[in-house]
Amino acid sequence: MRYLILSDIHANHEALRAVLAHARRKRWDKAIVLGDVVGYGANPNQAVDLVRGLKPLVVIRGNHDKVCSGVEDGEMFNRVALQAAMWTRQKLTPSNLRWLQSLPEGPVVVDGAFAVAHGTPIDEDAYIFGEIEALNVFRQTAFSLCFFGHSHFPVVFGLSPDAIQTVLTTPPSFRFRLQPGVRYLVNPGSIGQPRDGIPLASFALFDSRTRSVSVYRLPYRIERTQRKILDAGLPRPLADRLALGR
Ligand SMILES: [Fe+2]
């Protein structure tokens, strides 16, 4: 089975379209979405419509999905994020608002084969930035493979019996095979707002038969996305950061 793993789309229509066009040329069977379909970007309905059109096997909610749909009030958000969330809440169609409100909290186990979470499988709003956080998650869970998002950069943490290892994936594509006896936390990166200094959309494919994960980085029409953000009256930093990948 080949799983298309998408995360942190953030209402970026151009980036999601670039990813789906590229993914169409690969073969995939089931789509999995790790949350934050909306928030920050100017095309929340287009992003939700494209995701719903994939008929994904699993979509879990992200922190922005919760605030944008009114499931949470966003008191932990900074001013820019909250402003974008309130704008998004007003723009969402009733159907897309209900769909976002109905998304389940992670972790969710997919096909009995692997887990998915937004932030971590312990706390959907917490971050895994480095090995200390990854180690804590490994210690408190039993998953042999878990895909997560929220931190907006592609990374692989592997826990073998004697060490933890970090692999930062590199563009344009990176493929690795899961090793027996090693547990993995894998972030496919962010489609709509990468934050590793590389302004390319990021997504992953997981082949459960060959036990291999591929991470792809793709260019998209950033200027067009930025123009839409500014035209919508959303805060300028949301547009500026896309070109920086931060
Ligand atoms: Fe996010």
Image (cartoon, rainbow, N blue to C red):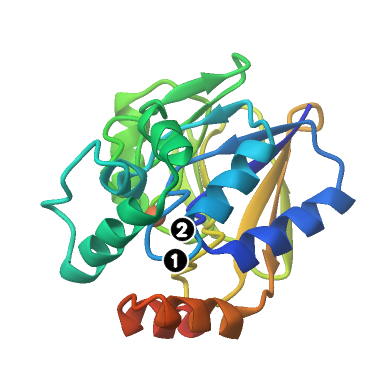
> CB of residue at label 1: within 8 Å of ligand 1?
no
Relative placement, left or right, of 187 versus 63 is right
Disc 2 to disc 1: CB gap under 8 Å: yes
Q: Where on the picture, by quarter, is residue 3?
A: top right
Image x and y of residue 132, in percent: 29, 49
* Residue 129 seen in the current view: no
* Residue 128 seen in the current view: yes
Which three-letter amino acid code belongs to the residue tagged 1? Gly
Image x and y of residue 82, in percent: 21, 61
Which three-letter amino acid code belongs to the residue tagged 2? His
Image x and y of residue 60, in percent: 45, 33
Q: Secondary structure at mark 2?
A: loop
Q: Secondary structure at mark 1?
A: loop
Along the line of sight, the residue nearer the viewer: 31 or 195? 31
> CB of residue at label 2: within 8 Å of ligand 1?
yes
The residue identified by callout 1 is: 41
Residue that appears at 24% across and 41% down: 70
The residue identified by callout 2 is: 10
**Quarter of the figure with the N terminus:** top right
Q: Where on the picture, by quarter, is residue 13?
A: bottom right
Q: Which mark is residue 235?
A: none
Residue 87, above or below 214: below
- Split into quadrants, the picture shows ligand 1 in the one at bottom left
- 3D distance between C-alphas at marks 2 and 1: 6 Å
Relative placement, left or right, of 66 versus 209 is left
Mark 1 neighbour density, 10 Å: few (under 14) some (14–19) many (20 or more) = many
Along the line of sight, the residue nearer the viewer: 176 or 74? 74
Q: Earlier in the sequence, mark 2 or mark 1?
A: 2
Q: Residue furthest top?
A: 112
Image x and y of residue 246, in percent: 41, 76
Mark 2 neighbour density, 10 Å: few (under 14) some (14–19) many (20 or more) = many
